[in-house]
Image (cartoon, rainbow, N blue to C red):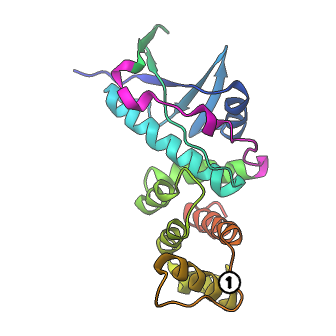
Amino acid sequence: MLVPRRWIVRLLGSDDALARLSQAFTVPPVQILLDGRDYRLEAAELDGLSRSQDVMNAATRLLDSATALLYVYTGIAAHVRPGSAYWIDGSGREHGIGCSVFGTLCRLEPDAMAKLTAVVPGSERPKVAAILSSAASDPVVAKLLSTIPDHEPSWADLYVLLEIIGGKRVLQGRGYASRSDLNRLFQTANYYRHGTGVSLPSVPVSIVQARGMVRGFVSRWLERRAGAG
């Protein structure tokens, strides 16, 4: 019979980058904490799991959500994956599992981690915690977070995100932007997605402007969906 365990997942990367990431996630349900010289991931969702592969799969998804929210709230795109994991028994003893067990899941990209030059502002952290909790039970929130790429979004990426949160009609109905601004955004996105059959608006939206707009829409949508707005 498999016994539920308290799991800890170690993270790898530059000390500076990991320190900044730990500042962004300081409270449950997802915490990134400094333990001596190591940074670790702790999450309520991991506790109670018995199979190591389930732990690493859950940790990967949680880190995907965490880095997605970092992008939404700071504009920093980063690719993070779990390293090794260990569990703690009732007497406080640690039982380690090496990276070789998990193969490619153990890879981390320090260069991408080093891009974390900003953290989620303190005032936004309760919202981030609420959204992460919501992702565990709301498949639409989970889908949106998993869709945010670990690189600067392309026009195609942005359009997919806009579709998930309801498209032009929902955004306009909720007052996220004016009808004219939304028309410009969607027309520009369609032009660059398709290349033919669609003309650019007279004042097109730049990709930098579009990323900022979509980040704002996504954060407001997530906060509303998670009851954190």
User: Is residue 83 rendered magenta in the image?
Assistant: no
What is the secondary structure assignment of the residue under circle 1? loop
Tell me, yes or no, if residue 132 can be seen here.
yes
Neighbours of disc 1 within 10 Å: few (<14), some (14-19), many (20+): some
Seen in the picture, residue 154 relative to 188 is either above or below; the reply is: above
- The residue wearing badge 1 is 204
Q: Amino acid at mark 1?
A: Pro
| Residue situated in front as seen by the camera: 99 or 49 | 99
Seen in the picture, residue 171 relative to 37 is either above or below; the reply is: below
Which image quarter: residue 183? bottom right
Q: Is residue 119 left or right of residue 41?
A: right
- Tell which residue pokes out farthest to the left in this image: 1
| Residue situated in front as seen by the camera: 180 or 143 | 180
Coordinates of residue 229 in the picture (x, y in percent)? 67, 64
Q: Is residue 196 left or right of residue 78?
A: left
Query: Residue at 57% of width from left, 83% of height from top?
Result: 186
Q: Is residue 179 left or right of residue 29?
A: right
Coordinates of residue 53 in the picture (x, y in percent)? 33, 30
User: Is residue 103 rendered magenta in the image?
Assistant: yes
Query: Residue at 70% of width from left, 67% of height from top?
Result: 208
| Residue situated in front as seen by the camera: 60 or 1 | 60
Q: Quadrant of the N terminus?
A: top left
Tell me, yes or no, if residue 90 can be seen here.
no
Q: Which residues are magenta?
A: 100-123
Coordinates of residue 25 in the picture (x, y in percent)? 65, 39
Coordinates of residue 181 in the picture (x, y in percent)? 69, 85
